[in-house]
Each structure stands twice: as C-alpha cells, then as structure tokens.
Image (cartoon, rainbow, N blue to C red):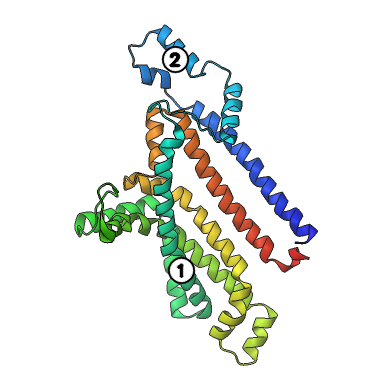
Amino acid sequence: MSGTMARLVLFRLGVMLVSLVIVAFAVFFATEMLPGNVVEILLGQSATPQAVAALRHAMHLDQPAFVQFLHWLAGLLSGNLGHSYVNNISVSTLIGERLANSLRLAAITTVVSVPISLALGITSAIFRGSLYDRIVSVVSISVVSVPEFLVATTAVLIFAVQLQWLPALSLTNNVHGWFGQLKIYAMPVMTLSFVISAQMIRMTRAAVIDTLNTPYCEMALLKGSSRRRVVLRHALPNALGPIANAVALSLSYLIGGVIIVETIFDYPGMAKLMVDAVSTRDIPLIQSCAMIFAITYLLLVTIADLMIIVSNPRLRK
C-alpha cells in the first residue's frame, strides 16, 4: 500500500471515529430532551417528591448533563451499555436476541436483493439503450421514489388482506419448518429489497457503463468483440470496485428501512425494541439502539468509501 493510499485510508477511518463521537453527543442530548420524566413514569403519578428525588439520585440523573454524557460515553467505549430503566436488566441482554433477529433479516435481504440487483444492473449495461434497459430503468426509478411504509402497507393489503397468502405480522414465535420461516420473512424482505435494489441497480449500471467508455473497452468493441464479451471479460473485472461501493452504500439504506419495516410488521428486532423503548422513555436502551444503528451505518459508508480508494489506480501510486 502506497503512502498516499495509506494516508487516505487513515483519514477516512479518522473521519468515521470523529463522526461517531458527534453522533454519540447528538444521541445522548436528543434523548435527554424527550418529553416526559422516566422517574415519574416508573413511580407513577402518586409518587412523592422525596421518592422521585431518591430515585433520581440512585439513577445518577441529578448530575449535570455533561457529566452524565461522559459517564455514558466511557461505559459505551468499555462495552457497558448500562441497565434498562423499565426492565431493570442489562441493556446488552435485551439487545442480544433482538440484534440477532435484525441481523438475520438483513442477511436474508442481502442474499435476495444483491444478486438480483447486480444481474439487472449488469444486463442493463450490456443491452444499453434497448427496450429491456428502458424498462429496468423506469421500474427502478419508480421504485426508488416509493417510501418504505407505502410498500409495506401495500404488501399487507395485497398478500395478507386480499389474497391471505401471508401473515400480516412477522411474529417469529412458534414458527417451525422452512415454509413457515418463508412466510414470516416474505413481506419484510420484499419491502427492504425494494428499498435497496433500485439504487443498487442504477449504481451498478452506471459503474459498468463508465468502464465501457474507457479506451481499452472501446478498442475491444472496434475489433469486433460483442458487447456482452467486453462487459464480462474487460469491463466487469475493472468495475468490481465501484460495484462493491454500490453494494455497501445501498446496504447502508437498510438502517432506515428496517426501522419502518420492523414496526409495521411487528418483527422482534432492534428497531422494534428501540420504538418500544421510546414509548416507555427507557433512555439507556434508546441510546444503545441508536448508537448500534449509527455505528452500522457509518461502518458501511466507510467501507464503501474505502472500496473507491482501493479500486482507484491513481490512488495506489
């Protein structure tokens, strides 16, 4: 790795770390400004001022906000996410199973959407300007314009209400066999695939076409090679970096989509846990969930950025 490239990689990693600190600051103080008092929620409206003050002191809520932030940040860096105010158990314990469910949903969505998106994007580049290319382009642009909640609601109305093929709620309890799992994950995966596939198709197509416009690909076309052969033998290997960037960047959009999808389908994942925590003002749980989403998003965006650096020959010199 050249000195210039190493500096760029270290710079991107430094930007990610600084962004995480800024996000942690924003998450902490945004949750502190949520309406409602968690102590009063826990003790009830009949709680005496003495009981409220005692519980605030026990929960360290009587300390200055910045001191609370430093304690929370230190715990976050050491892996101590604190205790849930409402459930009175470790936040790590609450998040463990839910995080596994969200990762499973994201993994299934990735396995389904990435091959389809890459195939459509590459074939659109091969048949650029054809009827097939125009249809794929129009459909992908139309899909990317539709919000996730509308896709999810439409899927429920069609497949759960009208056709009654799939359950309206993706409850994973007491589900056995691959067919039962297929029915549970069908609509959430379809909705999330709509979120990321359209963008991935467009970015993949643009990356392959950009590589096709290079002199060596144009020379291969002038020598009589078919467009398909030029794409598969010359353009695609050199477009792997931008394509990997497109995949990583598109997968980062799962973070926003999964919050809506898990809420609509009542899927027991991280996003649903965070939404429930907001309703009960469970501040440590909200903060931990938000930071996990932020870390995942920033990590994927940084990977996408590094893919561009690694795949750019000018930055390797």
Which residue is disc 2 drawn over?
A: 55
Q: Secondary structure at mark 2?
A: helix
**Relative depth, front residue between 103 and 27:** 103
Which residue is disc 1 drawn over?
A: 115
**10 Å neighbourhood of mark 2: few (<14), some, or many (≥20)?**
some
Question: Which dot, 1 or 2, sits closer to the camera?
Answer: 2
Q: Residue at x 37, y 57 (%)?
A: 189
Res 307 quadrant in image:
bottom right
**Quadrant location of the C terminus in the rendered image:** bottom right
Q: Residue at x 33, y 53 (%)?
A: 152
Q: Is residue 238 above or below residue 175?
A: below
Q: Say whether residue 135 is left or right of residue 304.
A: left
Label tally: 2
**Quadrant location of the N terminus in the rendered image:** bottom right
Query: Disc 1 versus disc 2: distance between alpha carbons?
Result: 53 Å
Q: Is residue 62 above or below residue 32?
A: above
Res 145 quadrant in image:
bottom left
**Relative depth, front residue between 108 and 239:** 108
**10 Å neighbourhood of mark 1: few (<14), some, or many (≥20)?**
few
Spot occupied by residue 36 in the image (x, y as percentages of width and height): 42, 23
Kind of residue indicated by mark 2: Leu
